[in-house]
Amino acid sequence: MNLAGARLKKVRLEKGISLEDAHKATKIHLDILKSIEENSFINLSPVYIKGFLKIYCKYLGVDPREYIPDYKGPQSTVRIEEGQKDAQALIFRTPTSSLNKFFSKVFNAKTMGIIFRTALVVILIFGLFKIGSAVKHALLSKKAKSSATSLAKAKKEVATKSEQTKPQATVVKPESPKTATKPEANFKIRLAIRAKEDCWAQLKADGRVIFQNILKKGRSESWEAKDKIELSLGNAGGVDLEINGRLIPSLGRRGQALKNILITKEGLSVGR
């Protein structure tokens, strides 16, 4: 039997038959056919070996007695066809059925329920963690924005106070009107204000408050006083002043607040 496989392989090749064709015709597993031709049977009963050899010899058209030792003919024929599937299953049994039994035991309804609940808890914890992180990030952003706004406001207030504390004593002597014909005793101070932008203003004439409101953009107002006019502005750069018909240069910047602007017969001065 040691040389029978090689001889049968030679016969198959001479007839131009592939192992695949032989497998389809005989229903013998490909691995068994290879084992037959390579004489490499391992843990296979001699009864099954003789049965497979008989089928293979008949398929190739050769006399089984020349390839099978102790071949006794039809009277000792084994019904290989009936046991062929069982023999192949015994030889080439895969662990599929065992694996199926293992997985069916492991992944039963109870186990799957536990796995599902565990996964649900993990997803819930992860979701809560993400939500907490998002809320924390939003709170930190809001706090940082609030701090930045407070810092900017504080810087602006410091800058405003610094500007207000600078000495800005300016004296402008208004020219007497050329057409003035009234005696010196009857001379009055005339102040006109034209608003280029909205500006809060307070005006005192001879110590009495006669105006305290917001001058809207484009509005003009004028007042007179006998001895002095005291003026406070919330937006020094947003107004034009005119004293006794003479235009006065801007006293400050846009948005700058000025207090204690004193206008007398001698001129104009801005106190500290």
Image (cartoon, rainbow, N blue to C red):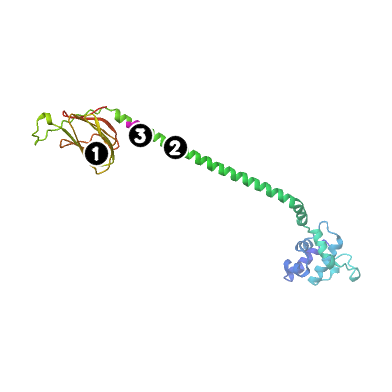
Give the side of residue 17 with respect to residue 271, left or right: right
Which residue, given by chain and number where applicable, does mark 2 sit on? Answer: 146
Closest to the observer, 197 or 162: 197
Say which quarter of the image contains residue 96: bottom right
Badge 3 vs badge 1, beta-carbon distance below 8 Å? no
Q: CA distance from mark 2 to mark 1?
A: 34 Å
Give the side of residue 79 with respect to residue 162, left or right: right
Which disc is residue 239 wearing?
Answer: 1
Q: Please, what secondary structure does the residue beneath circle 3 have?
A: helix
Q: Please, what secondary structure does the residue beneath circle 1 have?
A: strand
Which residue, given by chain and number where applicable, does mark 3 sit on? Answer: 156
Hey, what amino acid is under mark 1?
Answer: Val
Badge 2 vs badge 1, beta-carbon distance below 8 Å? no
Q: What quarter of the picture does the C terminus occupy?
A: top left
Q: Residue at x 89, y 71 (%)?
A: 74
Q: State how many labels appear.
A: 3
